[in-house]
C-alpha cells in the first residue's frame, strides 16, 4: 500500500483528492466570473476551506472559463483576527493581493505600515488599471463581523469597493452573514448564499472508492458500508473513518471483518469526539433539547425552525420524510449528554415536562405512576432508594397523603414495581431490588 490517501488533518489543497463539490465550485465560479459576491455557509469541518483552495487553483479556474492571468483570486484567512484594527486589516489583505499580483506579473507595492481605506483603494486602482479582476476569498469571515473595532466601517468600505471596482467577494461562515452582527448592513445585500451540505450516498461511496484506488487498496463491501454508516455523508468524518479503517487493515491484514468493526468504531469515536463536543457547546439549550428528543418532537410544528437549523448544521438528515442523526456515533454522543428537562441512561430517554419515554428509540407507554417511579430511580442512578422514601415521594402523590403520611409497609410499592417491570419488558432487570432495603436503577454492562 502507498501512503494513506484519506485526509483527516487540515484542508485538502490538491484538486486530485477533492471530491464531489463540482456543483458548488461551478456555481461559485460562475457568480465570481460575473462579479457577483457569494456567501458560502456550512458547519465546521464540512469542507469550506478545502472548497476555497480548489476554487483558487489556476487549473480549476481555467476549467470554468476564467483566465488565471486576468483574474486575481486571493485567499485570505480571517482566523485569529478577532481583535485586529481596521488599518491592520487593510495592510494584511493588501499584502496577500500584492503577492498574488506579483505572481501574475503585476507589481503592487507591499505596505510597510498600517494603511487607511483611501490608501488601500489607491493601491487597488493600480491593479484594476492593468485590467485585472479581483475575487477575495474571505475564510472564517464571521470573526471579522464580530469585531467591534471593525463593525460597520469595514463592511461599508468593502461594499464601496465592490461598487467602484471589478471586485467580488466570497465569504465563508458557519452562519448566514446577517446572523453574527447586531445590525444590518447594505454589504449583506450583494451576496448570493451557497450552502454546503452532506454528500449523498453515491458521492460518499465515490470518496471512499477513489481514495482506495489511489492507494492500490481494497475494502470488503461490508467494510465500505460500515465506513459509510459511520461517516453519515459528512465528508470529514468519512475521511476519518476511511483513514483508520485503512490503518487497521494494514495492521491486521485484509479483509476487515465484522469483529474488526467494533475496534474501528472505538478508534473513530476517539478521533472525532472533540468535534462533536464543539458542535454541542455551540447549540442553544433549546436546540440541545430538540436534538436529544428527535424521535419525539420532529412532527411537532413548534420545533420546525429548530429542526431546520440542526439540519443546516449537518447534525441531522432527513430520510423518507423523517429526521435522523447523521451518524450512529453522533447518536451515541447525544445520548451521553446532560440536557435540561431530560433524563438519559443507556436505552432510556425520559422527557420530564411531557412525561414521555423512549426505550431503544421507540416510544414506551407508561402510566403516570410508572413514569414517576422510573424517573425518580433514574435520577438517582446507582443509588439504593429506600422503600419508605419511594412510598412517600412517589406513591403517595396526593397533597392529603403527603400531609398525613405514615409508612404502613411496602405492599403498594411492590405492586407498582411489578407493573413498571412488566411495562419495561426485556429491560426490567434495570430495576434492582435490594431486599429489605429498597430499589435502585442500574443498567446492565452491555447498555
Image (cartoon, rainbow, N blue to C red):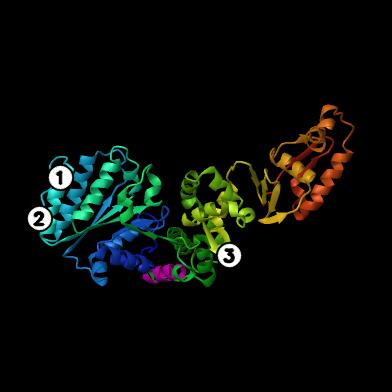
Q: In this view, does 60 lie to the left or right of 366?
A: left
- Please indicate, yes or no, whether residue 11 appears anywhere in the rendered image: no
Q: Where residue 365 sits: x, y (%)?
A: 75, 53
Residue 107 - label: 2
Q: Mark 3 points at which residue?
A: 321
**Residue in the image at 59% along x and 43% along y:** 339
Q: In this view, does 339 lie to the left or right of 59?
A: right
**Separation of residues labelled 3 and 1 (CA atoms):** 54 Å
* Cβ atoms under marks 3 and 1 closer than 8 Å: no
**Separation of residues labelled 2 and 3 (CA atoms):** 56 Å
Between disc 3 and disc 1, the foreground one is 1
Between disc 2 and disc 3, the foreground one is 3
**Residue in the image at 63% along x and 42% along y:** 341
Between disc 1 and disc 2, the foreground one is 1
Residue 213 lies in magenta, yes or no? yes
Q: Nearer the viewer, residue 230 or 261?
A: 230
Q: Is residue 24 left or right of residue 345?
A: left
Q: Nearer the viewer, residue 178 or 279?
A: 178
Q: Where residue 114 sits: x, y (%)?
A: 17, 40
Q: How crowded is mark 2: few (under 14 residues within 10 Å), some or many (20 or more)?
A: some
Q: Is residue 256 left or right of residue 407?
A: left
Considering the numbered disc 2 on the image, is that residue within a helix, a strand or a loop? loop
Magenta stretch secondary structure, dominant: helix
Residue 118 - label: 1
- Please indicate, yes or no, whether residue 376 appears anywhere in the rendered image: yes
**Residue in the image at 82% along x and 35% along y:** 396
Q: Earlier in the sequence, mark 1 or mark 2?
A: 2
Q: Give the residues in magenta.
A: 204-214
Q: How crowded is mark 1: few (under 14 residues within 10 Å), some or many (20 or more)?
A: few
Amino acid at each position: 500500500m502507498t501512503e494513506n490517501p484519506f485526509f483527516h488533518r487540515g484542508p485538502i489543497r490538491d484538486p486530485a483528492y477533492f471530491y464531489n463539490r463540482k456543483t458548488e465550485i461551478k456555481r461559485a465560479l460562475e457568480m465570481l466570473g460575473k462579479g457577483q459576491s457569494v456567501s458560502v455557509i456550512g458547519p465546521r469541518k464540512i469542507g469550506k476551506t478545502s472548497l476555497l483552495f480548489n476554487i483558487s487553483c489556476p487549473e480549476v479556474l481555467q476549467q470554468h472559463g476564467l483566465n488565471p492571468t486576468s483574474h486575481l483570486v486571493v485567499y485570505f484567512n480571517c482566523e485569529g483576527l478577532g481583535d485586529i484594527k481596521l488599518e491592520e486589516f487593510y495592510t494584511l489583505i493588501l499584502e496577500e493581493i500584492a503577492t498574488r499580483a506579483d505572481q501574475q506579473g503585476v507589481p503592487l507595492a507591499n505596505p510597510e505600515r498600517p494603511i487607511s481605506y483611501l490608501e488601500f483603494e489607491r493601491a487597488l486602482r493600480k491593479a484594476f488599471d492593468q485590467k485585472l479582476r479581483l475575487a477575495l476569498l474571505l475564510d472564517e469571515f464571521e470573526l471579522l463581523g464580530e469585531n467591534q473595532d471593525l463593525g460597520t466601517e469595514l463592511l461599508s468600505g468593502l461594499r464601496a469597493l465592490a461598487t467602484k471596482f471589478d471586485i467580488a467577494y466570497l465569504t465563508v461562515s458557519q452562519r448566514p452573514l446577517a446572523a453574527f452582527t447586531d445590525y444590518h448592513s447594505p454589504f449583506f445585500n450583494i451576496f448570493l448564499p451557497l450552502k454546503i451540505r452532506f454528500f449523498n450516498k453515491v458521492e460518499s461511496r465515490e470518496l471512499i472508492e477513489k481514495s482506495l484506488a489511489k492507494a492500490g487498496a481494497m475494502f470488503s463491501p461490508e467494510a465500505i458500508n460500515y465506513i459509510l454508516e459511520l461517516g453519515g455523508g459528512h465528508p470529514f468524518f468519512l475521511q476519518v473513518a476511511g483513514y483508520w479503517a485503512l490503518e487497521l487493515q494494514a495492521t491486521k491484514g485484509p479483509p476487515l471483518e465484522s469483529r474488526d468493526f467494533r475496534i474501528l468504531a472505538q478508534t473513530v469515536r476517539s478521533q472525532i469526539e472533540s468535534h462533536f463536543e464543539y458542535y454541542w457547546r455551540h447549540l442553544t439549550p433549546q436546540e440541545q433539547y430538540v436534538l436529544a428528543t428527535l424521535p419525539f418532537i420532529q412532527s411537532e410544528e413548534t420545533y420546525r425552525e429548530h429542526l431546520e437549523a440542526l439540519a443546516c448544521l449537518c447534525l441531522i438528515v432527513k430520510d423518507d420524510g423523517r429526521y435522523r442523526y447523521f451518524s450512529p456515533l453522533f447518536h451515541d454522543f447525544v445520548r451521553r449528554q446532560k440536557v435540561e428537562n431530560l433524563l438519559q441512561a443507556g436505552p432510556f430517554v425520559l422527557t420530564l415536562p411531557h412525561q414521555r419515554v423512549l426505550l431503544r428509540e421507540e416510544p414506551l407507554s407508561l402510566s403516570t405512576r410508572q413514569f414517576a417511579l422510573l424517573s425518580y430511580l433514574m435520577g438517582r442512578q446507582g443509588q439504593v432508594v429506600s422503600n419508605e422514601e419511594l412510598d412517600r415521594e412517589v406513591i403517595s402523590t396526593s397533597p392529603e397523603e403527603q400531609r398525613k403520611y405514615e409508612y404502613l409497609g411496602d405492599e403498594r410499592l411492590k405492586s407498582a414495581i411489578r407493573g413498571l417491570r412488566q411495562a419495561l419488558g426485556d429491560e426490567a432487570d434495570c430495576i434492582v431490588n435490594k431486599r429489605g432495603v429498597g430499589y435502585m436503577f442500574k443498567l446492565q454492562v452491555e447498555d
